[in-house]
Structures are given as C-alpha cells and as structure tokens.
Image: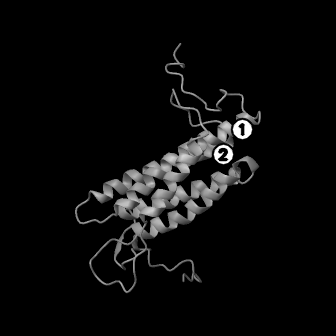
Amino acid sequence: MVVLNRIYTRTGDDGTTALGTGERRPKYDLRVAAYGTVDETNATIGVARLHTRAEPALADMEAILARIQNDLFDLGADLATPETGEDLGYIPLRIVASQVDRLERDIDTLNSSLKPLRSFVLPAGTPAAAHLHVARTVCRRAERMTVELSTTLGEFVTAEAVKYLNRLSDLLFVMSRVANARAAAEGESGGENTGDVLWVPAAGRE
C-alpha cells in the first residue's frame, strides 16, 4: 500500500533520486530518464482521454486507455527497480507477457475496421487523434531510452518492458486512425473517406 502524506522530502535537493532498490542516482541518469519518459507518456494519454471520454463513439478506446495508464505505472515501477541479485524484501513489479499480449489483441481488434494504408499519415485530424499522436511520439521516445538502457553495461531491463512500449506506440497509432475514421463516418471530418490525413510528398514545394 502506498501512503503519500508529505509531498516534498528535500531528499532530492542534491540532484539525486532513489530507485526502488534504495540506490540513489542522479536525476539525469538514463534509467531515471527512461521511467520519467514513461510517466510523460502516461500524462499525454491522460490528455488524450479528455477527448476519447467526450466522444461516445470512442468509448471502447477510452476503456483501453484507462487500463494502459495503470499498466504504465507498473512499467515505471519495473524500470525504477533494476535487478541486483539481492533480496529487496519484496518481489519487484514487472511487466509480464500477458500485458503485451493484451495490447496486441487491442491492435488487431481496432485495426480490423480500418482500410489498409497506402500512404503515411500526418499526425492530425480530430482532437482525439492529434493527442493520440502526441502520446505515440512520446512513447517512442520512452522506447528509445529503454532500449538504450537495456544495452548499457551493468543495467537490467526485461524484454517485456521493451516490447510493451513498442506495442503501445503501435496501438496509439491505430487508435489515432480509428478516431479519425469514426469521426469521418459521423460526418465530422472533411478528409479522405477513411478519415486519415495523408502525407502528400513534396506538396509544399513551389
């Protein structure tokens, strides 16, 4: 059980923060940056949910995003607790394969309603779609940092943690397409009949 009855502790005034193991590291440490960017991903999803919650047609995605926000706290705890081989007095929380599998099922379910892409899409469209694209790009940054951490000598990252971020960014992309497609079906978008806002190569040249 987590109890937060005091917000500031002054323990970080020296520029360090504590990992789940009790070890203190600089706040610019790659591991801290990785789980901090997972937290940033979570926050951008929270903003996206302001728009999915407001659209009855996106109720299924709203429920998925709510679950994902909880998963991302699991992931943050995972990354904040490197494997040391020592008894921590508790079992560290780790992302597990079933959480990755659930994302894959969500991707397949949502993607089945979409037409195949024959062009890259712009991160645009409805407010929900645009915010889901922001979340996707932040998630990709979290993934890059986590992969870099996993290849750093002496660091430990589970394969499932990396996979989760990879699948999540894919899911957020699919969700953005679905948000635009459903808006188009309801006559709320002036784009292509799929709702996608397509990239037109070299369109900005004079």
Residue at image x 33%, y 63%? 157
Question: Which image quadrant for residue 97?
Answer: bottom left
Tell me if mark 1 has few (under 14), some (14-19) or many (20+) residues whose alpha carbon lies within 10 angstroms of its own: many
First along the sequence among labels 1 and 2: 2
Q: Amino acid at mark 1?
A: Ala
Q: Are marks 1 and 2 in contact (CB under 8 Å)?
A: yes
Specify the quadrant of the image occupied by residue 23.
bottom left
User: Badge 2, how many Cα within 10 Å: few under 14, some, many 20+?
Assistant: many
123 sits to left or right of 158: right
Disc 2 residue type (three-letter): Ala
Q: Nearer the viewer, residue 141 or 181?
A: 181
SS at mark 2?
helix
Up-down relation of residue 81 to residue 114 (above or below): below
Residue 203 horizontal side relative to residue 126, left or right: left
Q: Residue 128: which disc?
A: 2
Q: Secondary structure at mark 1?
A: helix
In the displayed orientation, state which residue is furthest to the top. Answer: 206
Q: Point out residue 33 in the picture as x, y percentages from the top left corner.
A: 41, 60
Residue at x 63% of width, y 41% of height: 178
Can see residue 29?
Answer: no
Q: Position of residue 198 (x, y in %)?
A: 57, 28
Q: Residue at x 27, y 56 (%)?
A: 151
Q: Which residue is mark 1?
A: 183
Numbered label attached to residue 65 = none
Separation (CA) of disc 1 from disc 2: 10 Å
On the image, the x and y values in percent for residue 129 come to 63, 42
> At 34% across and 63% down in the image, what residue appears?
158
